Amino acid sequence: MSTTLAQAATVLVLGDSLSAGFGLRAEQAWPAHLQRKLDALPGKHTVINASVSGETTAGGRARLPQAMAAHAPDVVVIELGANDGLRGLPVQLMRDNLLAMVDTAEAAGAKVVLVGMRLPPNYGPVYTRLFQNTFAEVAKARDLAFVPFLLDGFAEDRRLFQADGVHPTAEAQPQILETVWPALKPLLPTAVSRR
């Protein structure tokens, strides 16, 4: 295998509207920023953004096997769960779906980055705590690379959200990438992870 091929990686982002770039052009979403970041590094790296607005963990679980077969990714970034929480779905169901997605990805030889989310306080302290803790518990159970909160560092800054108050603006997307990058970078080929 040539050095170039050895340094190539395919990253599959399986997310909801926060990764699909709801309200933005495709090239403005954080996975597109990731592609540009990887383009500047050695090797030919590909980012597949398989995110769908409104997606739940159940939807991601159903779609992942086909995505794995189609793209054979080296790394899968799972950014799902926010819509489960907003719909008040059982936390145990979300946990089971996340674990199933991790198992599917790892069985195909991919490494996994799990991205956590938080809910607004109006969902009640018990549910919001259980929801948030579930991501950390899944990451610990499977020893995953983990991003505790996708919107870390700007969740309270209304200026970085669209008019709906839920979806980040184009200006926030590079910050999202910088939140994900430290967990993702070590899973990429050695020549990339050293940069």
Image (tube, rainbow, N blue to C red):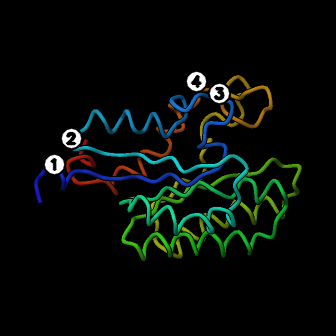
Residue that numbered label 4 is attached to: 171
Distance Cα–Cα, label 1 vs label 3? 35 Å
Please say if the residues under marks 4 and 1 sit with CB atoms less than 8 Å apart.
Answer: no
Q: Position of residue 154 (x, y in %)?
A: 64, 33
From the viewer's perspective, is the residue at label 4 or at label 1 nearer? Answer: 1
The amino acid type found where label 4 is placed reads: Glu
Q: Position of residue 77 (x, y in %)?
A: 49, 55
The C terminus: image quadrant: top left
Please say if the residues under marks 1 and 3 sit with CB atoms less than 8 Å apart.
Answer: no
In the structure shown, which secondary structural element does the residue marked by tag 2 occupy?
Answer: loop
The N terminus: image quadrant: bottom left
From the viewer's perspective, is the residue at label 4 or at label 2 nearer? Answer: 2
Residue that numbered label 2 is attached to: 42
Residue that numbered label 1 is attached to: 4
Please say if the residues under marks 3 and 4 sit with CB atoms less than 8 Å apart.
Answer: yes
In the structure shown, which secondary structural element does the residue marked by tag 3 occupy?
Answer: loop
Residue that numbered label 3 is attached to: 169
